[in-house]
Amino acid sequence: MYIYKRKGQKVLFDKQKIINSVMSAYKSVGEDFGQSESSSLSRHFNTHNLNEWCVSELGKMIPSVEDIQDRVEKWLMAENPKVAKAYILYREQKKQARFIKERINYMEEYSQSHDNAATSSETDANANVTIKNVANLEGEVYKTTNRLIQRARMKEKLNKLFPEVAKQYEADLNHHIIYTHDEASTPVLKQYCMAVSLYPLMMEGVGNIDEVTPSEPNDLQSFSGQITNLTFLLSSQCKGAVAFGEYFIALNYYIIKEFGSVWYEKLDIITTTEHCSQKRTIRDQIYKAFKQFVWGINQPAGNRSYQSPFTNVSYYDNTYFNSLFGEFMYPDGSKPQWAAIDCLQRLFLKWFNKLREKQILTFPVETLAMVHDGDDIIDKEYKDLCAEMYAEGHSFFTYISDSADSLASCCRLKNELTENTFNPTSGLTGVMTGSCNVITLNINRIVQDCDRYYNGELYPDEDDNPSKHWEGQVLWKCTFYPLLKEYLIKILDRVYKYHIAFKTMLYELEDRGMFAASNGGYIYISKLYSTIGINGLNEAARFLGMTVSNNKKYIEFLQLVLGTIKEQNKAYSIHNANRPFLFNSEVVPAEGLGGKNYNWDKSENYWVPEDENLYNSYFYDAHDDTSVLDKFILHGRQTYQYTDGGSAAHINLEDHLSKEQYLKLIDFAIAEGTSYFTFNIPNSKCEDCGHIVKKPMGKCPKCGSTNVTQYTRVIGYLRPIKSFGADRQIEADKRIYSENSLSIN
């Protein structure tokens, strides 16, 4: 029989070590360890009993050292409680000493290692951390403790609300059925991602949450400074992204204050401001505001382990704008005019695209939202603008919808505003939505656990055909699918309870005034969804013998899993006016989790595809030659309708397409119901002369140097590949970028 040691090594079980530790415990309290105790202990820990215990109680074949020691404690409590207490105390002392030693060793290893910050991270690798220093080392050291505290708080709350699943929570985490994102990032409970209203900023400024800033912004310069401060303040209040769906709406308010309501008609008029006597055009004054915001948010923040705050801004076409902000009123009672917002959006799009020819900045992540009527984008000018900017090498997300009843932000999140009591007619409400917590399902493991459960096999032999039970059956989906659905619903039933416990604690903290974002009116916990993440979906399909491609069998499998989750999301949602509990689901970006799930499953004898090194985040395989059109189809209405938290199609291209080709792809997306997508063409920067080109290059065309850094999306945001974690670097090297040979009939 084998056991797993604390660092994951699989070794032969040595019963004598158990006997020796128990004898020491008896000796420490002056008790005799006689023949009867020795015989009882040997029987309790013989191979047959241990195997049965592992399968029936632990649900696995190979126990850990901790599992064995837990069993020793139970045996001692029954045999001799006095000795048991001594054993437990000694075990705890050893645990504390081991923990401190491990933390010290980790600090030494982290500071001496030549690996980047993401690879050196013990959990939640993050390519957004550019360099290693004491700030991010501090954050890493605390992660183990943070996780322990978070789990203890969750178990405590679950014991009060849902005692039947309290013990199962940690078991589900340890068995890697589920994963709680950023669990280790902080010991306190925080919301995850949030799209906030900027109305409070216009009314009161950040002084209502920082108690430093004297008043609300009254001009362009003070607004630019306060919104940058606001980004950092709000970022400290959450674990994920901060999205500004009203950035250009608010910015326009302060431009009007300085240059009048029709400023967009006089962009090239030279002027001065109260704070700057230097003569500049209105256009240049606006560019200055852009610079202050963008350069500010790309600075690393010490309160987030030396990360830049993940920030998103949204653009809207005319139809979207009128639907969301047609009745929106500024603090002075005026309304934003489309001509001004349109001008601002176009200025920023083109300015930021040009800026990335000088410096490849990561944030903000941009999302351009458009509305279609079933046949075409209603606002043809914005459709044209979208294609034009893609053709010029810009990197942003596009979200298209048949109505303005939902909003996409960050790199995945799509929330249905109509179900989140969004009121677009009130300036006091603003764009508020987001996610308070993300718990991701490991679908590959769940499918295999289901297979083994119903077939009486906990773990198949290494040479077993993983799809043997279902392959070739005439009524394939009629046999396994009902079982899988039943099995998945049982897991989801627990996960919703975990989510409710977490959000309940957030509500309690909000009631105590602990969230500055809520206190300031920027976002409320009631506006946030609890998100079911999805990972390992493609890998589960391959386990069942399917080909991951645009084929009926695979799509039916996607619809079963995604449809079941959405169905249960609706069934479990609690539409309470004051304290709602709303659920959605997304195919998570999984920057670090994709690699962790893969490695966990592989090490524990689950089937994993040997041609991969992590689980991906799309409905297609990024490492094969799936056509661009098939990628759009796979992320079209037949799947996207089920992911009410979002799923983004990342279309990897070798080079930029023409404007006409992008226009055709937008039309194709409408036809197929593909709502959320981006085009990813790697950027290159020469580290010797600083020259940047918006396509892959191995040699600088300007100076001839081969010291070139490649930039691409790690998931949703643009980063240098050298900053990726080790698993993601391997994955990035495998990505296939389609050639510019697109043809749409």
Image (cartoon, rainbow, N blue to C red):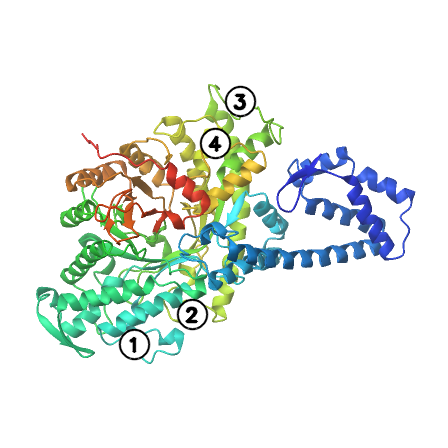
Indicate which disc, 2 or 1, sits on the residue closer to the N terminus: 1
Front residue of 521 and 384: 384
Single out the mark in the foreground, 4 or 1: 4
* Callout 2 crowding tier (Cα within 10 Å): few <14, some 14–19, many ≥20: some
* Residue 663 percent location from the top left of the image: 18, 41
- Identify residue type, mark 2: Ala
Q: Which mark is residue 337?
A: none
Tell whether 69 sits left or right of 586.
Answer: right
Indicate which disc, 3 or 4, sits on the residue closer to the N terminus: 3
Gap in Å between the C-alphas at discs 2 and 1?
16 Å
- Identify residue type, mark 4: Pro
Indicate which disc, 3 or 1, sits on the residue closer to the N terminus: 1
- Which residue matches tag 1? 216
The quadrant the N terminus occupies is: top right
Tell whether 373 sits left or right of 27.
Answer: left
Gap in Å between the C-alphas at discs 2 and 4?
45 Å
- Identify residue type, mark 3: Lys
Front residue of 145 and 20: 20
Using the rendered image of the protein, determine whether residue 399 is visible from the camera's viewpoint: yes
Task: Say whether marks 4 and 1 touch (CB < 8 Å).
Answer: no
Which residue: 91% across, 42% down?
A: 35
Q: Which mark is residue 609?
A: 4
- Which residue matches tag 2? 516
Gap in Å between the C-alphas at discs 3 and 4?
16 Å
Gap in Å between the C-alphas at discs 4 and 1?
56 Å
Gap in Å between the C-alphas at discs 2 and 3?
55 Å
- Which residue matches tag 3? 468
Indicate which disc, 2 or 3, sits on the residue closer to the N terminus: 3
